[in-house]
Amino acid sequence: MLELYHYGDSLCSMKTRFCLLEKGVEYESHFVDLLQWEHLTEEYKKLNPNSVVPTIVHDGMPIIESTIINQYIDEVFDGPSLTPEDPGERARMRILIKLQDDVIHPAIQKPTFNLLMKPLLAKKSDDELDEWLSTHPLEKSRKLFKGAARGPVNDEALEDARNQFNFVFERMDQALANGDWLCGNQFSLADIAFAPALDRLGQCDWLDLFDGYPRVMKWCGRIREREAYAKMRPQDAQRLSNLV
Ligand SMILES: N[C@@H](CCC(=O)N[C@@H](CS)C(=O)NCC(=O)O)C(=O)O
């Protein structure tokens, strides 16, 4: 049995849930409540020394990093292959996934923390923030949480994030000229990687970003029709925007 440690409205968790559901892999779910600092407990750090979600545990072995986890799931389990056969296509898929990891993930964190997490973290006391954040192994996360809890909305960061989305949408639009999915006509780990962040744009009222990228918009429509996509999304009550 595979175990998944994850949070409802976490993009990286959604990425891994999407992959598991597409492959038809059953898993035991362990909910890690980021707002209750459950990712910062000593017990969780033994599985994931970065104190982030998701983590899978398979045959007693913890595996971290959503992109690596999804590759592992695709390699190890039966079910439809989510990786192209052709090495050139595979390379193109990995370049797109790298764009998601390197550009989209840090970009989407800006509206997530400035717009969605801010009202939730503002309720935390200084003592609680200091107590938990001082134990966070990642400086980047300490800054994101602290900035959202106490700092003003960072308009410059939001503008920068929008520019990053435009940069990547341009690349996605080009890729989608070759077929229905990001790697031609094969639905792949690249489609899975991008879907959660684009889902988050709706919550942030940033859907105007799709203007000018009709192929990306149509791709979103196709993604939404997938059964696994509907199942991996958090329930409305778990959405960050509904927790305030
Ligand atoms: N590169 C990591 C990033 C994981 C990550 O940042 N997860 C977020 C949720 S999407 C998280 O756990 N944040 C809590 C924190 O930074 O403290 C991955 O892809 O798994």
Image (tube, rainbow, N blue to C red):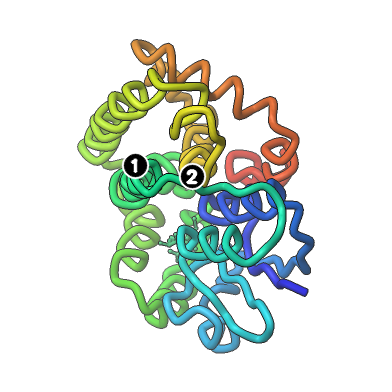
Q: Secondary structure at mark 1?
A: helix
Q: Is residue 100 left or right of residue 57?
A: left
Q: Which of the 4 image quarters holds residue 126?
A: bottom left
Q: Say if mark 1 contacts mark 2, CB within 8 Å.
A: yes
Q: In the image, what residue occupies the spot 40% across and 21% down?
A: 178
* Number of other residues with Cα within 10 Å of mark 2, as a class: few under 14, some 14 to 19, many 20 or more: some
Q: Is residue 115 left or right of residue 22?
A: left
Q: Secondary structure at mark 2?
A: loop
Q: Which of the 4 image quarters holds residue 74?
A: bottom right
Disc 1 vs disc 2: which is toward the camera? 2
Q: Front-most of 104 and 80?
A: 80
Q: Tell me which amino acid carries mark 2.
A: Pro
Numbered label attached to residue 92 = 1
N-terminal of the pair, mark 1 or mark 2, is: 2
What residue does disc 2 label?
84
The x, y position of residue 196, in whole percent, is: 53, 41
Q: Front-most of 208 and 25?
A: 25
The x, y position of residue 15, in whole percent, is: 56, 50
Image height of 5 relative to 137, above or below: above
Numbered label attached to residue 182 = none
Image height of 118 relative to 132, above or below: above
